Image (cartoon, helix red, strand yellow):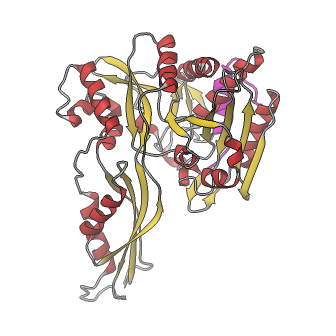
Amino acid sequence: MPTPGNDLPEVVRIARDLIRFDTTNHGGGRATGEREAAEYVGAYLESLGLEPDYYEPIPRRTNVMARVPGRDASKPALVLHGHLDVVPAIAEDWSVDPFGGEISDGMLWGRGAVDMKDMDAMILTSVADILRAGEQPERDLILTFFADEENGGVEGSALVVRDRPEWFAGATEAVSEVGGYSISAGARRAYLLQVGEKALAWIKLIARGRAGHGSRHHPDNAVTRLAEAVAALGRTEWPIRLTGTTSELLEGLAELTGLSADDPDALADTTGAASGFLRSTLRTTTNPTGLTAGYKHNVIPDRAEALIDVRALPGTEAAVLADIRAIIGDDVELEVVHQDIGLEVPFAGDLVDAMVAALGRHDPGVPVIPYLMGGGTDNKALSTLDIAGYGFAPLRLPADLDFTGMFHGVDERVPLDALVFGQRVLTDLVRSY
């Protein structure tokens, strides 16, 4: 249950408590585990009169769910989901303890403040608002908190949908992270509603050569071969390729700014700190993220490896891998470590209308624009059960805050008033939709 701090809004206290659980996920099965955080969530759900169900297919990789009965059982259920794991944080790089849950300058600091223990807290407290008032949501809510999202959900949502599909019985739509937050385009504020996600492919490049003494003339060098391939791929400028969602995004930004939609990057640049996030949604990205080679300064190794994070637009997955193979050449092997699919759903329908209306009631007159997320969420796993997923973690943010830059970044933090705003909007949504 929440730790003391009654002078703080409950949503802030819950988010702070969750940050203080170190749920670091290094990927590849190396993780601290989500068990204690999941038990905390379960205890909170129990305090609301709900009956949480746990699923731990791998020791300490704990998922938790509870179903909230709605007023109208004839309506499809809505999934509200989050993940409890976080990416690693190097404490020496931070100005605060990344797992301290510190509050200063009107913000909550710590790993997970943005991705995504803020949304976890908003989900919990929004449901609490309704139940404590003696009310019910409009339809059944399925509250789910997954493990392992930061590893592609391999040991989390993928196993849950495979082994516990009954958790999601009757659900057709889902709401989760990385959408609903505000940006500034020129001098105007707008909200981005996430209706799509790029495809993920984590690949490994492997170069082989001949081992030898570091002092030799040695053209058959695995490290050199790998470095050339990594540089070629990392410097590739992938062309802009618009989808239905990104076309709508550009139209919305053009209307806000008065600029032409003919120059997508220039339009993205009008959003300031968010521009890097939005530019990545317009094209494939292939970013080198790791290098491994050698074991002694004077020994030339016979093998060198690199990790590449590939994000392809929906429907282009196979073509992108073929292009990568052509870029790196025949002398370097390509191994797919993990791959999933891209998603895109219409910026239309009753749920979209309800999310837009909820934002409008709390921030009147501010437009809501669809966008395609450059990363991915557990909505991909839920899509295998024919559940359409959206990103809607509503936050009204200061124009000068580089919010998108803090995803997986240093000194991750979220304004306290943005958390309170998000809780109110989300409460409004689940009460009315």
Can the viewer see residue 88 in this picture? Answer: no
Locate the N terminus and report the quarter of the image it occupies.
top right
Can the viewer see residue 337 in this picture? Answer: yes
Place of residue 104 in the rendered image (x, y in percent of width and height, measured from the top left): 56, 26
Place of residue 378 in the rendered image (x, y in percent of width and height, measured from the top left): 55, 45
**Is residue 267 toward the left or the right of residue 41 in the image?**
left
- Is 7 inside the magenta-drawn segment? yes
Place of residue 285 in the rendered image (x, y in percent of width and height, measured from the top left): 32, 51
Where is residue 96, by image quadrant?
A: top right
Where is residue 288, by image quadrant?
A: bottom left
**Is residue 1 toward the left or the right of residue 104 in the image?**
right
Q: Which residue is drawn at 51% across and 30% down?
A: 392
- Is 22 inside the magenta-drawn segment? yes
Q: Where is 176 relative to 314, above or below?
A: above
In front of the other: 83 or 225: 83
Write the start and end of the magenta stretch as one range: 1-24
Where is residue 269, by image quadrant?
A: top left
In front of the other: 212 or 252: 252
Q: Residue at x 34, y 32 (%)?
A: 273
Place of residue 4 in the rendered image (x, y in percent of width and height, measured from the top left): 76, 26
